[in-house]
Each structure stands twice: as C-alpha cells, then as structure tokens.
C-alpha cells in the first residue's frame, strides 16, 4: 500500500462493454468529489484527458475480452496494477456479447458488416478472470453504486469488502415483496441470481432476469423444473439463462441442459 | 517560430471524455489537411446478430446494453418498433410516462456532457474534478442537476443505468399520481438551475466556425420530439420511420468498427441537439424559447461549438416538460396493454440525447426476432464529425501541436459522441507532411 500521506492511485480501464459500469462512478453525484479527494485518479479516459502511466494501486476493469489486442492489453493492465477489480457482467462473465460463444462468430460478423475482413474479433467473449488473476469481482449489469463505493473504500482501508453472495430472493423477502412466482406464476431467476440490485424486478412486478449472475450455490436444475411447471418451453428456459451472464458456468450449464432437451 | 512546432500530424490515441474507445488522426501537408480519420477501435459486439432468435419482449432489455449512457433511448426505439410490428396502440397516460422517462435521460445525459465532459474544454481543465478545485459551485450545481435527471429515471425505471420497468404496451408497474408529484420541488429547482446553466455556458468563447449542415431530426405537429414524429431535414426530407432505409444508407470504412451512414445522393448529415433545436424551435415551451433569446441564440445555429448552449436549452425544455407531465398525469387503468405474438415488421425512430436512433425488427408468428437493424446517432454523425475536422483543422496549422490537438478533440466532443453505441467508435492522431 502507499504510505499514509500518499493517496492510492487508480486506473479505470474499458474493454468490450457499454460504459455503464464506469459511468456508475460518475453517477455517485453526492460522493464523487469526496472520492476524488481520497484517491488519485491517474487514468479514466471517460472522465479526463489527463492520462497518466502506472503503476496503479487499484485497476478497475470494465468489459470482456473479444479481440487479440484486448487480450494483450489486459496483461499490461495486470502488470501495472497491485489490485485488479473487475466490474460488471461483461468483465466478470463475458457479458451479453458472449452469446456469440454458441455460434459461428464469422457468420455473426457477416450478418452485421458488409466487409467482414476489416473486422478483427475472437470467437469467444470471455471474462477478465480467464486471462489474468482478478482480486475481486463486482457483479451486475450494471453494478450497484453502493457496492462500488464499498469495494473501493474496503480496498483503501485494507479490509474485506462486505458484498453478500446470497440470492435475490433474500433481498425480496427483506423488502416484503409478494413473490411473483408464487402469486402470479411469473418465471423469475431470483432464486439462483446473486443479490445486489435490491430485488428490483420483483419490486416492479416482473421476474428477475439475472443481471447479477449466479449466486454462490445456485440450484439451476430445480429452478428449470419449476419453470417447466409454469409452462415454459425448453427454448424459453435456455433463453432465460442465456442473458447478460450467459457464459458464467452455472448459467451456461443450465442453458445447455435446457437446449439439449 | 520554426514550422516544426506546428502540427504535421495530430494524433490522439485515446480520445477522452467520450463514451467508448476511439482515436483521431489528422495529417497536414503544409497548411492543408490531407487526411482525417476518426478510428473506432471499440470492439464490435454484434448485437444485430445475436438478437435473432430472441423474443420481441427481450429486445428492449438487450439493446439497452448497447449504451450505459442512453439505455432509455434503446428501450424506447425497440419498444415502439415492436408495437408497430405487433399493431399495439398504447394509452395516452403511457405516452406521457414515456415522455417523462425520456426527460430524465436527457437531463442526466446532457448535464453529464455539459458540466463534466464539455465545459472543461472551454475553461481549460483536463476534467471536471480538476475544474471543481476552482469552480466548485459550478460542478456541484451540475452534479445536483444530473442527480435530478437520474431521480426521474430511478423512480420510473428502478435504477439509473439499464432501468427495468419499460415494456411493450406500457410499463411493468403502475405509477400513482402522488409518486410523480414528489418530483415537483426538485424539478422547480432544476428548471431555475438549467436557465442559469444556459447563461453560464453562453458566456464561453466559441471559435468562428459555421459549416453548411443538413440537419436531420424528428418533427411532431405539437411537441418538441421524443418518441414520435416524421423525420425531417432543413433540405426537404420529410419521411415516415418506415421509409428510413430507402433514404439512408450505412457503409463500412476500413478505419472504423462503427458503420458510417449517409443520406442517399446527399452525403453526411447532422443529428442531435443542433438539428432538433433548428427544426423544432417553435415547439419549445415559452420558457426555453425565452432562455435562448436572452443569450442571442437564433435559428439556425450552425456553430457546432455552441451545441453546449443548445444542450443547456434542451435541459430547460426537459425540466419544463417533466413538470408539465407530472401535473397532467392521471394513472391508466392497467400498467400495459397486451401484445399477442404475430408476424410483422416494425420500424421506429426516437430522439436519443445524441440524436435519432433507428430500430427495425422482423418478427415471426411466435414473436421471435428474425432480423434486426439498429442505427445509433453517433454512427450517423461519424462522417459529419470527420467533415467538421477537415474544415476546422486548417485554421490550426499555425497553432502549437498541443493547442491544435486539444481544439480537435473539442471539435469531436461537440457531438457528445457515444462510441459504445456506434460500434454496437475515438483516439486523435495529427500527422504532417512538409
């Protein structure tokens, strides 16, 4: 860690993503100037044209790896950083762009671009942890503002971040929501999805669609059976798991099982 | 001064304070600009390919992930296109709620750009945080205004980024009148603060630069445009969204992972705040028209550096419109109308903060997407940004490299480009051949 007088230095790096997770930092309207006072932001192109070289005490990484260039760049970021934190479903699970992983990416490129030979992209969209050691993964599509502040504060203070690994169901019960599955027969990924959003979708009378990825010990087989009882087809079940965290192995397995049936 | 201090090439490898990843390259031959390219190396994410096989109800949540800054624009264009494909008519109260939702996104996105991404250029700071050391009150006011935009989005959508409540036919949840009226005090403050913002930014120094643009924006008979209207231009274009692909063509250039777009037979065009303001000034509420007149903003505004003032005027509009909506709103009987599966094709254009966003979907009889096409505003502005640089850069031939680079970056930031969107695009390099 830096000496007491020196502020920890931070770099924010983007790979394939929508920018939403790093925008979360700028969305901390009440805390932004305070955070900027406690840390030295050395690299954050979305916010500043001053871009300084590492080393960085903390690298905050958004996005998945989808090109050879980015596969090299993440190695450089890792080498320049003491602690590497990945933020969001793209960085922690490959993101929605990982839907290519079940298809022929060349056909995908041909479907979008008239001159596919100008486009350089990998067959797979993969999370950062498949390329380098990651010190902490913050889930969500997008991440939660409070959890981002918690993880940065914990890192600066040298303590373990308090980010619970239980399911959305726990958050739903705490809020006193009526269960959308039990009361309305609405398919909901809440039982297998990592907490963090505050059970948003059930609070708005819709089923959870899995933004935060798999919780610690998800029973996806049981939930898939429940979905069948609710009248969902195997194709619909496969699609439910094949969202923003499709390449997270528990969801991947569940979607492939439904796909085979 | 020896010529070696003047720019031969300007290169910005990582363009800052834009959404996404791109670079800029300008090559001089003496005082002449011989090459300009806006390279977009943001990796392609191939949304139009993987949308195939998904159900119509999933498109708004999936496409919102193209952009964390303007997810509501994606949700609105997707939902309106689906409603057209499925023949769904929404209730008037839902229409009002969608306008309020879009007001929230415009306030949040425009405020982010005006205060945090663009103002530092005019005041000479690398970023808003450095600017806050000497202009704390300005940055704090911007943050509070931004927060109010986000409060609207969070109320209707659950969270600021990738909100979860919008559905084909309406919303997942029913909103009460009192919930919306709770926004009134914040919006009254925001309306005043946005008028002050217009005065503040109109005092900045603007280079004398007025290209001859074709402005393209929606035009609705009675309202400043969000979700509906015909697509109009200052050179006679007047079409329905369904005819978009007959008039506009997307093409690929080697240096960009984002497709460029041009008006058939006419070339580059401009979308966004300048286009909307110039084509719809008469539809702004009196308070926004008054704010524009007070700072001498007269239609047509052709100076792209003044887009920051127009963005501030649109914040005034969005605050006034949000206040109108919450006062007029009466809850509908049900949160949404049903939208049974059927085969069809639907196109929609809505006004994202950065300009028009086109979606088209073909659905099969089970409501499954067969093909999808998405044309974001930054793709459409890409050719025009390069053209601006070609016309603007020659006057920088006598400037220092550092100043020329900064001014070119600023010329790009005039567009508030969203590169993440455009690749569903920036890095500056200036090169000189003597």
Image (cartoon, coloured by chain):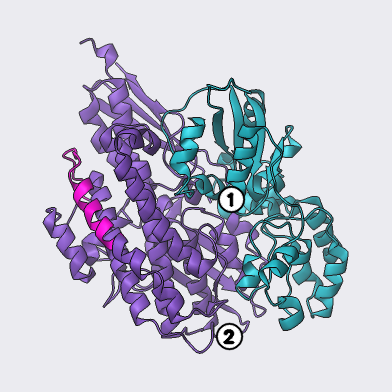
Chain colours: A cyan, B purple
SS at mark 1?
helix
- Which quadrant of the structure image shows residue B109? bottom left
Q: Is residue B4 above or below residue A230?
A: above
Instruction: Pinpoint residue B403: horizontal percent, then vertical percent.
Output: 28, 25
Pointer 1 indicates a residue of which chain? A
Instruction: Pinpoint residue B372: horizontal percent, then vertical percent.
Output: 56, 64
Please name the residue shown 72% across and 45% down the image: A124
Instruction: Choose between B274 and B346: the one closer to the eye.
Output: B274
Highlighted range, magenta: B190-212
> CA–CA distance between discs 2 and 1?
36 Å
Q: Is residue B427 left or right of residue B265?
A: right
Please name the residue shown 68% across and 49% down the image: A105
Q: Is residue A162 left or right of residue B217?
A: right
Evaluate whether residue A68 shows in this view.
Answer: no
Instruction: Pinpoint residue B107: horizontal percent, then vertical percent.
Output: 37, 59
Give the residue pinned by disc 2. B338
Give the residue pinned by disc 1. A146
Instruction: Pinpoint residue A250: horizontal percent, then vertical percent.
Output: 82, 54
């Amino acid at each position: 860690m830096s000496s007491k007088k020196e502020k920890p230095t931070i770099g924010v790096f983007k790979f394939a993503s929508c920018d939403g997770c790093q925008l979360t930092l700028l969305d901390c309207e009440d805390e932004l100037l305070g955070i900027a006072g406690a840390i030295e932001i050395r690299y954050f192109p979305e916010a500043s044209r001053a871009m300084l070289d590492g080393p960085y005490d903390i690298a905050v990484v958004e996005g998945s790896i989808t090109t050879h260039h980015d596969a090299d760049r993440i190695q450089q970021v890792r080498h320049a950083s003491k602690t590497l934190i990945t933020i969001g479903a793209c960085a922690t699970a490959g993101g929605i762009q990982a839907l290519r992983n079940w298809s022929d990416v060349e056909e995908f490129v041909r479907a979008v671009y008239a001159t596919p030979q100008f486009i350089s992209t990998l067959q797979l969209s993969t999370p950062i942890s498949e390329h380098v050691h990651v010190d902490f993964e913050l889930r969500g599509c997008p991440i939660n503002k409070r959890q981002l502040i918690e993880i940065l504060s914990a890192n600066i203070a040298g303590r373990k971040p308090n980010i619970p690994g239980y399911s959305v169901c726990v958050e739903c019960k705490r809020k006193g929501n009526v269960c959308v599955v039990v009361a309305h027969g609405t398919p909901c990924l809440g039982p297998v999805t990592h907490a963090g959003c505050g059970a948003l979708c059930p609070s708005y009378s819709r089923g959870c669609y899995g933004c935060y990825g798999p919780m610690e010990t998800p029973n996806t087989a049981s939930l898939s059976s429940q979905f069948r009882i609710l009248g969902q087809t195997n194709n619909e079940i496969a699609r439910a798991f094949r969202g923003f965290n499709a390449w997270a192995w528990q969801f991947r397995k569940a979607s492939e099982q439904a796909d085979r049936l | 001064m020896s010529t070696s201090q003047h720019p031969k090439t300007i290169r910005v490898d990582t363009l800052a304070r834009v959404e996404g990843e791109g670079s800029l390259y300008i090559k001089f031959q003496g005082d002449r600009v011989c090459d300009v390219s806006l390279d977009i190396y943001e990796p392609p994410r191939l949304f139009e390919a993987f949308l195939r096989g998904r159900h119509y109800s999933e498109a708004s949540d999936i496409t919102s992930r193209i952009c964390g800054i303007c997810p509501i624009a994606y949700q609105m264009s997707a939902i309106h296109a689906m409603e057209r494909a499925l023949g769904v008519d929404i209730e008037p109260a839902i229409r009002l709620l969608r306008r309020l939702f879009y007001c929230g996104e415009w306030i949040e996105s425009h405020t982010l750009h005006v205060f945090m991404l663009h103002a530092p250029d005019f005041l000479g700071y690398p970023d808003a945080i450095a600017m806050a050391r000497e202009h704390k009150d300005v940055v704090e006011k911007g943050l509070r205004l931004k927060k109010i935009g986000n409060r609207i989005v969070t109320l209707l959508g659950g969270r600021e980024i990738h909100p979860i409540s919008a559905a084909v036919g309406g919303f997942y949840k029913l909103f009460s009148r009192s919930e919306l009226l709770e926004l009134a005090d914040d919006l009254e403050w925001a309306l005043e603060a946005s008028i002050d913002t217009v005065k503040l930014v109109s005092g900045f120094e603007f280079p004398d630069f007025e290209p001859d643009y074709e402005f393209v924006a929606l035009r609705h008979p009675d309202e400043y445009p969000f979700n509906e209207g015909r697509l109009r231009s200052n050179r006679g274009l007047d079409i329905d969204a369904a005819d978009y692909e007959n008039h506009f063509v997307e093409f690929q250039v080697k240096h960009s992972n984002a497709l460029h777009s041009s008006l058939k037979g006419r070339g580059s065009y401009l979308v966004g705040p300048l286009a909307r303001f110039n084509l719809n000034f008469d539809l702004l509420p009196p308070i926004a028209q008054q704010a524009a007149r007070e700072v001498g903003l007269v239609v047509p505004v052709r100076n792209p550096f003044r887009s920051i003032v127009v963005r501030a005027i649109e914040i005034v509009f969005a605050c006034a419109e949000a206040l109108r909506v919450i006062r007029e709103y009466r809850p509908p009987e049900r949160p949404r109308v049903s939208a049974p599966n059927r085969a069809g094709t639907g196109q929609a254009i809505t006004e994202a903060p950065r300009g028009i966003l086109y979606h088209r979907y073909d659905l099969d009889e089970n409501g499954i997407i067969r093909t999808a096409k998405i044309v974001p505003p930054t793709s459409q502005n890409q050719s025009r940004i390069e053209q601006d640089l070609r016309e603007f850069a020659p006057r920088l031939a006598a400037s220092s490299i550092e100043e020329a680079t900064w001014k070119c970056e600023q010329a790009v930031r005039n567009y508030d480009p969203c590169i993440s969107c455009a690749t569903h695009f920036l890095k500056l390099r200036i090169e000189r051949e003597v």
